[in-house]
Each structure stands twice: as structure tokens, then as C-alpha cells.
Image (cartoon, rainbow, N blue to C red):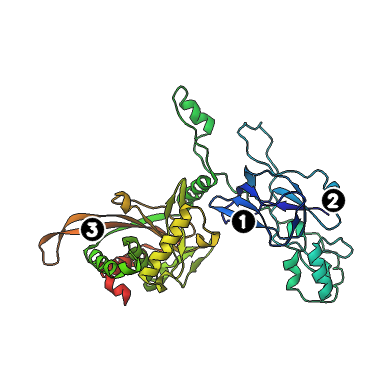
């Protein structure tokens, strides 16, 4: 039977996307793993690969369509021997329009989609791709005993490749009726404050430009609103003297100039934080709903401003990398973030993040924790400041303000203070970071 191709979830935060470009047309032969479309998520433009094989029977969503919901049909794939007349009238994926929708009764609660369909019962029709059927026949597999991971429980190539032949199971005895599991609570709508129409009425007669929200801005708004509402933030503030670090940086850059390497202050902050996470391992943790996960490696996320929002690419195993390696990786991640070319695995994870606004002249600020991280370090600008030296005399030092925002569910006050002190110790004694 014709198979619906559904809008995939190509990033952890994706709820809808834009079908940027079709790379195939109706009538084209499709093979498993073939790139058939480019889809713009809330973070980047990603390639979409087919999980099945057949012929592209009908494209339901045109190129450039925005607001296509995850798991909505976008095309129909025909199996061997099927034709366009077998498609019927599939329901196209809903797309956003500028017109206001009429008021409708509340929709029925969405059914949670099972990650993998149960094996077919005795006598029930088994849906499988032609390739999966051929592999199963060669291996002597009983398709009715295999759970499908494709659309609508369809058995695809990946389901049969790792399976081994087994005797056909007898039909299970009818189970006694059981209460249906409670439906998962619906995800709350993104808080927006006052209704849009109410706000616009307040500015009737005034000139303004209405800015349409893209996927990234919606995601930033939803996640940070959730973070401030659900995470019990507290803040720890310290200042760090940078004179030793600046002199050491200048010396290293002079020696590395021939290799085209130029270290930034941010590179030292990443290294100092990664080493501090190893020195204070209890702070290298994330909140996981009903438990805390303590990580072994230092995976450090770094906020990168891009047009319309921000990314937090993650440098994995930062404690094991040299300053020059950290610098090169950070430059590459930042460049690809600004071009929206990061893959999801490059901006997911980490237990801790750094947000540096010092280059914009900001002296100090409080950053919002990016869940599930346990903390985030807000870094301000280095400023020439009068200080009292150890011998009691007054001098001038380059001083930088740091604020550690902490999730109190994960890190308590004393532990957060210990972690921040370890970061500052590394920055004020930069040579020790190379030992």
C-alpha cells in the first residue's frame, strides 16, 4: 500500500519546520538512505533521507512551505507494482498562513506516537518494504514477529538486517482488559504574555513594523521562558584579575603566529572552566527530571550569537584539548553556527555553558541557564580598575566580572562557590593550565 512520508524531527527541539527544497520529483525512484529533501529546522537546514524504497508518487507539501508540523504527511511513496491511482486522497500537511483562523472547538488530545510498532498478530497483514521483504526471505525471517520502526509501524531495512531467524510464535492468549494508560500531558503553549490582538490595540494609531517569528526565535522564547519559570536560579559573583593571563596570552600568540594561531581570552575561559569541572566533579552535572546526572568528561557549551537568535555549540572533552585545539574548534563551530550549518549533535549536550558579552563592552550580567545544564557562566569585559595589592599599596589591574548562574536543584551554594573559585584560580594562574 502507498506509504506516507512524514515530516521528520531533525533536531531535539523541532516541533515544526520549513520544507526548503525537494531534491526529487514525482515519478523518481527512491532508495533507502537517499537524500530527498532539505528541511529548515529551528536551528539549521538539514538533509532528509528516505528510510524506504519505492517511487515518489505524490508530493503533498510544496517547496518553501513554512510551519509544517513534525509527523505531518509531506509526500506519498509507492511500492513496487503500485500506481498513482492507489494513493486516493491523502491529507496534506497543514501549513501556516497569514489569514486568521476561525475559532474551533478544542482539539482532541494528541496520541503519543509509539517509538516502534508491536509485531503483527496471527493472521494480521504485515506491512514491509520490498527491500525488507527480500532480506527477510533470504534470512528465513518471520516478518509477523518483527516490530517495524518505519511510518505506521512499517518494517524497513534496518529492522530486518540485525534480526535472526526464529520459529514463528504462537498467537498470545487474549489478555484481560486493562485500563488505558493516562495520556501524556499536553505541552503547554509558549508563554507570550498578553494576547497579540490586545497588544496591537494598545498601539493603534502608532507606526510599527510587525516582525514574524522564525523557528529559532520561537524556540529561544519557549526554552528560556521555561528555564526562568522552572529552574530555581541563584547567582554567584566574583572578579578575576587578568594581568597575568593577558601577558601569557601575548607571549603564546607571538610564538604561535607562524602557525596562524591566535588565542582569545574566551579560549582561556573555556579551558579554565573545563579543568574546573574536573577539579570539582560534583558541579559537572545536569538535571534529569527525577535525578541528577554527573558527567565524567568536561563538555563545555559556548553561546554564539547569530542573526535572529543564538546557538550553544558544545566542545566535547574540552579538558583534554590544548588551547590551540580549543581555539581552532571554537572558531569552526562559531562560523558554522552563524551559517546555520551545525548538526544537532554539535549543539546538544554539555553540563555547563559560557556566555561572553565582554567584547560588547558589557561589564556584568546574569545569564539564563540552558536546560538541562546545571550552570552557566556570564563573562563581562575586562576593565582597568584600581585594586589593593597584596602589599597594601594601590595599583591598577585589568579586572573582569564573572557571574555564575546556578540551578539550585543540582548545585548548592557552597559547591557553586567552589566551582567558581576553581575557574578563577585557573585564569589567574594560566601557566598551570598547561601543566
Looking at marks 1 and 2 on the same chain, the residue that comes earlier in the sequence is marked by: 1
Q: Quick one: label 3, few (<14), some, or many (20+) residues within 10 Å? A: many
* x and y, in percent, of residue 103 in the image: 66, 32
Residue shown at 81% from the left, 75% from the top? 139
Residue bearing mark 2 = 83
Disc 1/disc 2 C-alpha distance (Å): 27 Å
Residue bearing mark 1 = 47
Nearer to the camera, 58 or 172: 58
Looking at marks 3 and 1 on the same chain, the residue that comes earlier in the sequence is marked by: 1
Nearer to the camera, 404 or 44: 44
Q: Quadrant of the C terminus?
A: bottom left
* x and y, in percent, of residue 414 in the image: 34, 65
Report the mark closest to the observer, 3 or 1. 1
Q: Is residue 302 visible?
A: yes
Name the secondary structure under disc 2.
Answer: loop
* x and y, in percent, of residue 164 in the image: 77, 76
Q: Quadrant of the N terminus?
A: bottom right
Residue bearing mark 3 = 399
Amino acid at each position: 500500500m502507498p506509504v506516507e512520508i512524514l515530516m521528520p524531527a531533525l533536531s531535539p527541539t523541532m516541533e515544526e519546520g520549513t520544507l526548503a527544497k525537494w531534491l526529487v520529483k514525482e515519478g523518481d525512484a527512491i532508495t533507502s538512505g537517499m537524500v530527498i529533501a532539505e528541511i529548515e529546522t529551528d536551528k539549521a537546514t538539514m538533509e532528509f533521507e528516505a528510510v524506504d524504497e519505492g517511487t515518489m508518487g505524490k508530493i503533498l507539501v510544496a517547496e518553501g512551505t513554512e510551519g509544517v508540523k513534525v509527523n505531518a504527511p509531506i509526500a506519498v511513496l509507492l511500492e513496487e507494482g503500485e500506481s498513482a491511482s492507489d494513493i486516493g486522497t491523502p491529507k496534506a500537511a497543514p501549513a501556516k498562513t497569514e489569514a486568521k483562523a476561525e475559532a474551533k472547538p478544542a482539539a482532541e488530545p494528541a496520541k503519543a506516537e509509539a517509538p516502534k510498532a508491536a509485531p503483527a498478530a496471527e493472521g494480521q497483514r504485515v506491512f514491509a518494504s520490498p527491500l525488507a521483504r527480500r532480506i527477510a526471505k533470504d534470512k528465513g525471517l518471520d516478518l509477523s514477529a518483527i516490530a517495524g520502526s518505519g511510518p505506521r509501524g512499517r518494517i524497513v531495512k534496518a529492522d530486518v538486517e540485525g534480526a535472526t531467524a526464529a520459529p514463528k510464535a504462537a498467537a498470545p492468549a487474549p489478555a484481560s482488559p486493562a485500563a488505558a494508560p493516562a495520556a501524556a500531558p499536553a505541552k503547554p503553549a509558549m508563554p507570550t504574555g498578553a494576547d497579540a490582538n490586545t497588544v496591537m490595540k494598545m498601539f493603534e494609531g502608532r507606526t510599527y513594523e510587525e516582525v514574524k517569528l522564525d523557528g529559532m526565535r520561537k524556540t529561544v522564547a519557549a526554552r528560556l521562558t521555561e528555564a526562568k519559570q522552572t529552574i530555581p536560579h541563584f547567582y554567584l559573583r566574583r572578579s578575576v584579575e587578568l594581568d597575568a593571563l593577558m601577558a601569557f596570552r601575548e607571549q603564546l600568540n607571538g610564538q604561535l603566529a607562524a602557525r596562524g594561531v591566535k588565542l582569545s581570552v574566551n579560549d582561556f575561559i573555556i579551558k579554565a572552566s573545563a579543568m574546573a569541572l574536573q577539579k570539582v566533579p560534583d558541579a559537572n552535572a545536569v538535571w534529569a527530571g527525577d535525578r541528577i546526572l554527573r558527567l565524567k568528561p568536561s563538555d563545555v557549551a559556548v553561546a554564539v550569537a547569530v542573526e535572529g537568535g543564538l546557538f550553544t555549540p558544545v566542545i566535547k572533552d574540552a579538558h583534554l584539548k590544548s588551547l590551540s585545539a580549543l581555539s581552532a574548534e571554537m572558531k569552526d563551530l562559531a562560523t558554522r553556527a552563524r551559517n546555520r550549518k551545525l548538526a544537532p549533535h554539535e549543539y546538544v549536550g554539555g553540563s555547563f555553558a559560557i556566555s561572553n558579552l565582554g567584547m560588547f563592552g558589557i561589564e556584568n550580567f546574569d545569564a539564563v541557564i540552558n536546560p538541562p545544564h546545571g550552570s552557566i557562566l556570564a563573562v563581562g569585559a575586562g576593565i582597568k580598575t584600581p585594586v589593593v595589592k597584596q602589599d597594601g599599596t594601590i595599583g591598577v589591574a585589568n579586572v573582569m566580572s564573572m557571574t555564575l548562574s546556578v540551578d539550585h536543584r543540582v548545585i548548592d551554594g557552597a559547591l557553586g562557590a567552589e566551582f567558581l573559585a576553581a575557574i578563577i584560580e585557573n585564569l589567574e594562574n594560566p601557566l598551570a593550565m598547561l601543566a
